[in-house]
Amino acid sequence: MKAAVVSGFGESPRYADAPEPVASGADEVVVDVLASALSPRVRSQAAGSHYTSTNDLPLVPGIDGVGRLPDGTLAYFLMPDTNHGAMAERTAIDLRRAVPLPEGADPIQLAAAMNPAMASWVALKQRVTFEHGQSVLVLGATGSAGHAAVEVANRLGASEIVAVGRGGDRMQDLRKHGASRIIDLNETSDTVARNLAQAGSEIDIVIDFLWGEPTSKALYAIIPNRARDEQALTWIQIGSAAGLESPIPAAALRAANLRIIGSGQGSVPLRAYRQEIEALAQEIHAGAFTTATRRVPLRDVEQAWADTSSTERIVIVP
C-alpha cells in the first residue's frame, strides 16, 4: 500500500510503499483510512520530539483519523504510540480507541476538528470539575487548539473567556467565537502584564498551550493581583509551543490558591477519554465546532508538509 513515510527525524515524509497493516489481538481491526489531519502534534511525532516518541524509524505519521471499518461503519479513531500511523491507505486500529460516527458525517471536518478541540474538551470535562458560569483564560489562543479552546469554553457555558495570543486579525476573530476579552502578546511587556493582571484577577481556569516564558510572565502578572487569594485558580498545562520548561515563581504556590495540573496522554483513563471523544464527535457532527480545512491527496504529502504558514487545517486523504 501507499503511505507517508518518514525515514529521518526532521525530514518531510514521502509518498512511498509501506507494509500492509496487520491486526493483532481481539480489539484490533484494519480500516480503510478516509482522512487524517496534519497537526502540530503529528509534526512533533514525525520529528521525534514528542514525549511519547519511540525514536524508531521509519515511521508512518498520523495520530488519529476517520476510517471505514470492515463492516462498513464509519469511525473516528485515535492511534496508540506506534510507527504505523494514520497517514496511509490502511491502518490497524484499536476499537477501544475508536468511536462510531453517524452515516453522512463529514470525514474531512471530523478529522480536522477533533484533535484541536479534544485537548480543551477533555481537560475541562475530565481534569477539572468545570461549572457553568466559571471564567476561562486561554493562553495561546491563536493556534488551532487555542482557537478551539475558546469555542469549547463557550459551548460549556463559561461566563467570561479571555483569549491571549499573537496575531492581530486572528485575535479579533476570536470574539466571534466567544472571547469576551483579547490580550495581544505583541504589545509592550508592560501593557501585556497590566492586561493579564486585570483579566486574571478573578479568573477560575487557565488553559495553557504555551508554557515556557509566557507562562512564567503570566504567573508573575496574575498571582499578585488576585482579587481574593482564597479563590481557586486551576492552571491546566496542555501544550508547550513556547518552551518545554517554565520557571514557576515559588511565591505563586504560596500566595494564592493555585493548582497546576496537566492534561494529555496518560492523565485521563482510556475509558473516560473514549467517552469524551464520542461526545465531542457528536458535537462536531452537529456543527458546534468547525475548522477551516484544506484537503490534500496522500501523494502530495511532502509538499503539504512544507506548508507551515497555512491557517487552514491540512487533511490528508488517501
Image (spheres, rainbow, N blue to C red):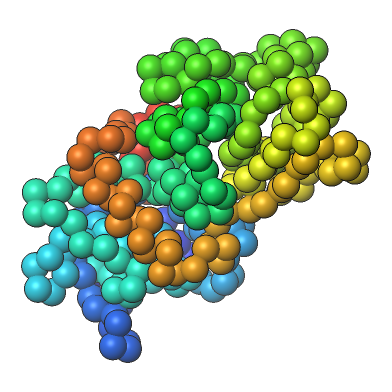
Residue at the location (80% across, 12% down)? Answer: 190
Residue at the location (63% across, 34% down)? Answer: 204
Closer to the camera, 86 or 264? 264
Q: Position of residue 235 (x, y in %)?
A: 67, 42
Give the quadrant of residue 236.
Answer: top right
The reply to whether residue 15 is in sight is no
Residue at the location (17% across, 45% down)? Answer: 106
Residue at the location (64% across, 46% down)? Answer: 237
Q: Is residue 290 above or below residue 120?
A: above
Q: Is residue 168 above or below residue 150?
A: above
Q: As drawn, is 221 to the left or to the right of 31?
A: right
The reply to whether residue 198 is in sight is yes
Closer to the camera, 8 or 189? 189
Q: Residue furthest right?
A: 251
Give the quadrant of residue 26.
Answer: bottom left
Q: Position of residue 139 (x, y in %)?
A: 61, 32
Q: As drawn, is 269 to the left or to the right of 30?
A: right
Q: Residue furthest bottom?
A: 25
Quadrant, the N terminus = bottom left
Closer to the camera, 251 or 301? 251
Total marks in image: 0
Quadrant, the C terminus = bottom left
Q: As drawn, is 290 to the left or to the right of 63?
A: left
Q: Is residue 47 above or below residue 196?
A: below
Give the quadrant of residue 276.
Answer: bottom left
Q: Position of residue 307 (x, y in %)?
A: 42, 36
Q: Position of residue 25 (x, y in %)?
A: 32, 88
Closer to the camera, 193 or 244? 193
